[in-house]
Image (tube, rainbow, N blue to C red):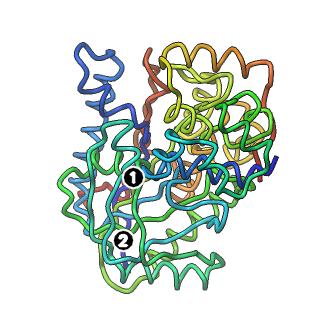
Amino acid sequence: MNKYQVNKVMRQIIQDPESFQAFKENPAAFLEKQSLSQEERDALMRIDYPTLYAAGVHPFLLNGFVNRVWPGERAKLRAEYRAKIAPLGYPDFST
Amino acid sequence: MAKLVEIIGITHNPFLPRLIKAPNPDPVIVKTAKDYDWMRQKMAQARPDVLIVVASDHLNQWFMDNMPAFLVGKAPSTEGPAPVEIRAFGLAPYRAKIDTDMAKGIIREGSRLGVDFAFSDECFIDHAFTVPLNFVRPEMDLPIVPIWTNVMAQPLPTSQRFYDVGQRIREAVEALPDGTRVGVLSSGHLAVEIGGPKTSDYSSDTEFDRRMMELISAGDAQTVIQEATYQRLVKAGNVTPGFLNYILLMGIAGGTKPTATGLDFPEVTAAMHYMDWEIDGGGAA
C-alpha cells in the first residue's frame, strides 16, 4: 500500500467539504479519480480501518477519516475500533 | 538587544476549552483553568511587546509533500484554527499580526547560528497555536512570530536538535538590535495516543508524564534529551512526540530550572500541565 497516497486522500476527505460530499455520495467514483491502487480504493471505500491501520497509514489521519465518514454510532465505533486494531500493535507509519 | 521576559509551555489539548465550559467539570479541569489563568497573568505582568509561539501543525497545513522541520511564519498576519477543527472541537478563533521584522531577523540570525529555518508568507495556525494563545493572551492584541515544528511526520528531528534549535532561537532573539520585550509561548503535550490501541480518555503513560515533568522541574535538560528518544516517545503513546516542543522550550530557557511547573491527571482527558520560566524576575525587569 502506498501510505503517502492513502494519507493524502484521507486528509483531503477530512479537510475539503466537497471531497467529503463526493466520497459520501459515490465513494467508488470519487476514489477512481485519485492516484490509488484497487486495494487502496477498496480499503477506503469499505472504511476498512484494520487493513489501513495494519498497512501503516498515519493513525492521526486514520482517526480523523474514520470519524468523519463513519455512518454509524460513534460510541460503538470507538469500542469496535480499539478491539479490532489492538491485535495489530504498532505498524511503522513512516512514509 | 531584544530581551526574553517570560517563557511558558502549556498543553494544546483541543478538548480542554469545551471541558472547562462543561457543566460539573472534572475538579482537575477546574484547577487547570485556574493554572492557565495564572499563566495568562504572568505573561501579562512580563509586559511583552511580541510573542514567539512555538507549536506544531497537525498535518492541517504542512504535509509529507513538502515537510518543514522548523518553519517561521512571516506573513503580515495569521489566524485559525482550521475549519475542520472548529467543527470537531468547537474551538474559538484567534487572529494576530505577525512581527515580520522579528520573524525575518530570526531566520537571518538562525542561518548565521546554524539553523536554516523554512519560512512561509501565507500560513494559518491550527489548534496547537490557537488553544494556548486563547488561554494566555485572549486579548489578541500582541503581534506574534509563529514557529512550527514537525512532530507528526517521520523522520522527526531528534530531541537534541529540538533543544539546540531552542538555544539558537534564544541567541537569535538576543542578537536582534532593538529593546523589544519578547514572551515565548509553546504548546505540546505529554503522553497521548490517537488512532492506536491505547486511545482513551486518560493519559496513555502516566509514568512517562511524571518522569518528564520531574526532569523538566529539575531543569535536567540533558536527561530529558537522553530519555526522550523517538522510540520512548511513541511507546508512551503514538503521537507523544508533541512533547518535543517542551524540549525546544528548555533550550530557549538555556537549560535553567523553571520558576513553576504543574502536573495533574484528570479523569476525562490526557495529563494537564504547565511550565513557566520568569526571566530576570519577569515583570520586575
Q: Chain of mark 1?
A: B
Instruction: Give the percent coordinates (x, y) of residue B30.
Output: 28, 22
Q: Is residue A76 left or right of residue A9?
A: left
As helix, strand or loop, the secondary structure at mark 2 comes to strand
Q: Indicate the quadrant where residue B260 lies.
A: top left
A50 or B210: nearer the viewer: A50
The residue sitting at 79% across, 51% down in the picture is A2
Q: Quadrant of the N terminus of chain B?
A: bottom left
Q: In the figure, B11 relative to B162: above or below?
A: above
Give the amino acid at mark 1.
Ala
Instruction: Give the percent coordinates (x, y) of residue B236.
Output: 68, 30
Q: Which mark is residue B82?
A: 1
The residue sitting at 55% across, 34% down in the picture is B213
Q: Quadrant of the C terminus of chain B?
A: bottom left
A30 or B222: nearer the viewer: A30
Q: Chain of mark 2?
A: B
As helix, strand or loop, the secondary structure at mark 1 comes to loop
Q: Indicate the quadrant where residue A21 lies.
A: top left
Q: Which mark is residue B3?
A: 2
B138 or A74: nearer the viewer: A74
Few, some or many residues within 10 Å of mark 1 (<14, 14–19, 20+): many
Instruction: Give the percent coordinates (x, y) of residue B152.
Output: 63, 50
Q: Indicate the quadrant where residue B118 lies.
A: bottom right
